[in-house]
Image (cartoon, rainbow, N blue to C red):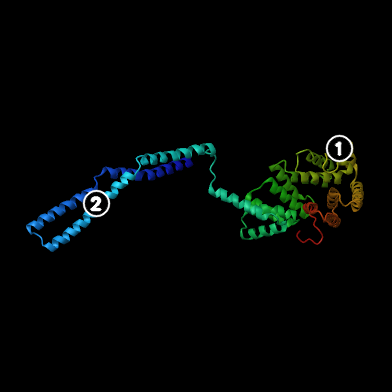
Amino acid sequence: MLFVILAVSLTLLLLGIVFLPVLRAEKTESDPDEHAFDLTIYKDQLRELDADIERGAIAPAQAEYARAEIGRRLIAAQEAVNVEASGKRAQPSGGRAFVVASALFAPLAAALVYSMTGSPGMEAQPLAARVDEIRQQAASQSLQGMDIGELVARAEAHLETNPEDGRGWDVLAPMYLRLGRAADARNAFERAIALQGETAARRSGLGQAYYMLAGSVDIDARAEFERAVALDSGDSRARFFLALASAEAGNVAEAVKSWQSMLETGATAPEWQAAAQEGLRRYGGEMLASAPGSAAPQLDEETVRDVQAMDAEDRNEMIAGMIAQLDARLREQPDDFSGWQRLIRSYVVLGRKADAEDALARAASAFSEEDAKRGQIVEFAAALGISLPGDTTQ
């Protein structure tokens, strides 16, 4: 509506500018001819001068000077009359009508064309919003090609001068998790929650930071995961770690059931489905889960009871034997990407951090020519609190 009002106002203003000279010209033509009137006056002055000379009322020299001056003015007036007369003859009789028709046709034609090709119903796009969108696109494009370390450095520099920027902390916290910097991730998530408010993603991210610091789902981590599920029952990360907490507490059946529910199509984010697969493998044995990427089989009650019936020593012995077999197989077949994930997770679950770091180093070496897979392996391990030996970013 605002656009229509402005368009109509500008059209009326322009029509006024076009018609004003025409109206003025019409008014001028209706007035007496000023130049013709001057011509009459000068002729009368010449007659009066001749009468003064006959009476001797003026000296001959003054009379000649006056005659010359009046004659000059008379000639100028006559030339003006001639010019005016020729201009009127040259002006086409239909010129004014053409100007009027053009002035009326232009806005009507513009309205017709806009109605066919324009979008009068489109919502307004304020300049500030468009400029902000352009800036965001430019910033996104400028970040392409940077590694995560460079992005973190930029974010840290920004937050050093703008510590109350909650959005900045919200962006930085997950980056710290990917780099395995658990303490920094915990602080960043806490700042984001304090400034931006709590969400399931922020709470479960904070819980993962606590998990990485403790090496298990301790009381602090569990509290954060439970809070995340209260905010969003579908939060994949919180569901995985709460199942892991049950497994660590000895309630394997509950953990297996929870992880199985995460493997249903569309129930969980893909990366956490893979984590659920690993959980099933570690705590239920190889028979408890299918290969990564396929649907997991349903556990029968007898299998679950057999696993639960094992004491801790027997269960650990069984798992240790399976891990040893997996480790040996990966030395011969190092291109098994999912196998490396299972091996690293297994060592972490058993608290064998040195073995987990060694497995990560061998996996990174195996995929040294495949940057994408190598990066995924490093990121996967970082989420478990494991980094490459010699990496000081954690």
- Residue at the (80%, 62%) spot, across then down: 390
152 or 371: nearer the viewer: 371
Kind of element beneath mark 2: helix
Q: Reply above or below: 198 against 364.
A: above
Question: How many numbered circles are shown?
Answer: 2
Residue receiving disc 1? 299
- Residue at the (37%, 41%) spot, across then down: 95
- Residue at the (75%, 48%) spot, across then down: 222
Q: CA distance from mark 2 to mark 1?
A: 119 Å
20 on left or right of 184? left
Three-letter residue code for mark 2: Gln
Three-letter residue code for mark 1: Leu
Residue receiving disc 2? 78
123 or 376: nearer the viewer: 123
In x, y percent, where is residue 294? 83, 40
In x, y percent, where is residue 345? 83, 50
In x, y percent, where is residue 291? 85, 43
32 or 380: nearer the viewer: 32
- Residue at the (31%, 44%) spot, across then down: 89
Question: Quadrant of the rendered structure where residue 55 is?
Answer: bottom left
144 on left or right of 28? right
385 on left or right of 285? left
Q: Earlier in the sequence, mark 2 or mark 1?
A: 2
The image's mark for residue 374 is none
In x, y percent, where is residue 173? 70, 53
Q: Reply above or below: 234 against 76.
A: above
Residue 108 visible in the shown view:
yes
101 on left or right of 297? left
Question: Quadrant of the rendered structure where residue 16 is?
Answer: top left
Q: Quadrant of the C terminus?
A: bottom right
Kind of element beneath mark 1: loop
